[in-house]
Amino acid sequence: MRITMRSINNNILTNLNNLTTDMARINSQISSGKQMSTISDNPVNLVTALGLRSSLSQITTYQGNLTFGDKTITAAEDALTQMKDIALRAKVLGLQQANGSVTAQNRASAAEEVHNLWLEAITLANSEVNGKYVFGGFRTTGYTKTEPDPFVADLGSGYSVNGQPLPALPAVGAAQYNLNAGDLTINGIPIDATVADGISTARLNASAAAKATAINAKYASTGVTADITPAGRQATVAVGAGTLDAGDLIINGQDIFAAATPILAQDTDNTLVNAINAKSGLTGVIASRDSSGKMSLTAVDGRNIQVDTTGNAGNGETVTHLNGAIANTVYFGTVQLSSDRPFSLQTAAGAEPGLAALGLTGGTPTTNEVNDVAGDGLLTVITIQQQDGNVRYAGDPDHDLAIKVGGNSTMEVSKNGKAAVSDTSIFTMLKKLEDSLLGQNFSSVTGLNKATNTAAKLDSGSTGLEQQNTPFTPGIIAITVTDHSYSPPQNTTRDVGVDIAADSPADIAARINGIPGMTASWDANGQLTLATTDPERYSFAYTDTSNFLEMSGITTDAMQVQAISQASGNSDTVMDNLSTQISDFGARANRITVQQQIYSNLELSTTANLSEKEDTDLTQAVLELKSKETAYEAALAAAAKTMQLSLVDFLK
């Protein structure tokens, strides 16, 4: 094949251009420090490098998450540690004040400090990191004017609505107040029809117990619970003088009197009260009377109270006045519905049978829900009730705060505030200590004195409670029970009459035991204990003109000292609970440290791999550039000689 000068010249130029391109490429690699600037430089390496860059970006993100998690855990540990210090300070204050010689002014000053500790604990519970709440669970942001933080003082913990008392009904008649199939749905879940409660004697399907059972059976689906306020009946007229015989007064199917028994006006000797209470084990009903001699009955649970005064020409009614007329009447307890979240109840519009059975018809005046319209068949419970002294948790109680540490992996870094803070009882302990220092909201007390014979009459001198300078006197023990489940709290006062000639310590305890929300009992040591049936719901206060409680060793100061001591003792439990939480966060911190080390090593190896794929080896590049320069110079020299040849040279 013949090679022309044109072909030679073209080849020379092509080779020189290739060398020039190579030198430009190498020079670019040296100046930029990168092996590739375009895909064509090295397609395989570039794709690998892009994947490594993406991995490195994810690693950086996860490391940032871990840094946030580490800060969150540190903030949580600091907050819990400071709360533990608060609990210790509260214990010290309690121990100082649990002394009968301390003045009311000193205790009031200590109460103010405890209140400030309570507020400080709330502030610590609302700790933030980078604008996100440490104990908010998944709800780290997005709070409202009503709930500005995860922990809010003086608001109820959930949502609730209280059924109103239902009018009494005849023991026999058309079914009323039952929940029938289809009558009620809660949060879209149908509630089954009520069935006989097994404890009432009339209107068995309409009792508070029957309704609470039906509603609580669907709690797992609705998230709504039903609590009971026991049935009660208070006469509007004082006990009249007369005789009660068999059949005159029947309560929950039990005949109270077996033979003719004289009853004094106002039952001043407590014959009627004692007779009813003697059958309370069978009836589930306890009796008491006030200072004017009016009778009151209270069920011990969610059963109905059936009072029959029809016997012997209505003597039972003319003496007791329990029914207001000669009748066989049933009285009903009420139901309170509660949930951690807003909830709704639906029933047929108009008569609203499902709401009527719960005492929730009538719209806003009944339910206190501003959007509740009477007769529309719908009740939505969305109001957060004011509750002084309570701390509402508005965060996410179901999930812990977690960070992303992998494509499909997360790591929990902080517990939600309910588990980490509220359940330690730090707020409850501090508030109870504050209340006890202020002498309010007592839930229990045990008398310091010991009775040797609780069956002896008070004027016998044989009770063992007698004191030289303080005699028993006829009088009244007035006990006020506060139900804190309502907003505002509801007070109920019952008077227990004391007749020193007719009453024994056991008789008086039995009548106090009949007050709604109260229990009273003599223990084996002969000491009297008064307590509320639910310390979280009820508290009590009293006045006594009979000296009975004082002689039993129950005084305002004794109540206060015992309450202070109990609250101080609870601080140990709180500190143990907080220590457990701190240890848990310490374990989380260790996991963060391990994960940070893993990602640190991964970052180093990924960076090294990326560098290998895209960074320029300067030594190799300089040598290669020198090689290309030498080749280029040689090519130029050869080209100069070749391109100087002419046609004459070829013809020679």
Image: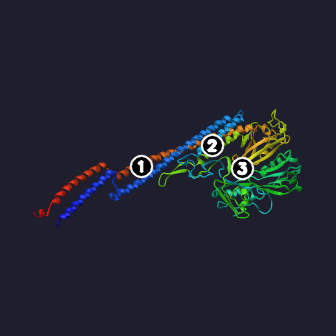
What is the three-letter code of the residue carrying label 2?
Leu
State which tag comes first along the sequence, 3 or 2. Answer: 2
What is the three-letter code of the residue carrying label 3?
Pro
Asked which quadrant contains residue 270, the reply is: top right
Disc 2 element: helix
Disc 1 element: helix
Residue 427 visible (yes or no): yes
Viewer-proximal residue among 554 and 161: 161
| Disc 1 to disc 2: CB gap under 8 Å | no
Q: CA distance from mark 3 to mark 2?
A: 22 Å
Disc 3 element: loop
Which residue matches tag 2? 119
User: Where residue 496 sits: x, y (%)?
Assistant: 81, 44
User: In which quadrant of the rendered image does the C terminus lie?
Assistant: bottom left
Give left or right: position of 481 versus 263.
left
Q: Residues within 10 Å of mark 1 (few under 14, many from 20)?
A: some
Marking on residue 488:
3
Q: Nearer the viewer, mark 1 or mark 2?
A: 2
Asked which quadrant contains residue 106, the reply is: top right
Which residue matches tag 1? 603
Q: CA distance from mark 1 to mark 3?
A: 60 Å
What is the three-letter code of the residue carrying label 1?
Glu
Give left or right: position of 15 versus 186.
left
State which tag comes first along the sequence, 1 or 3. Answer: 3
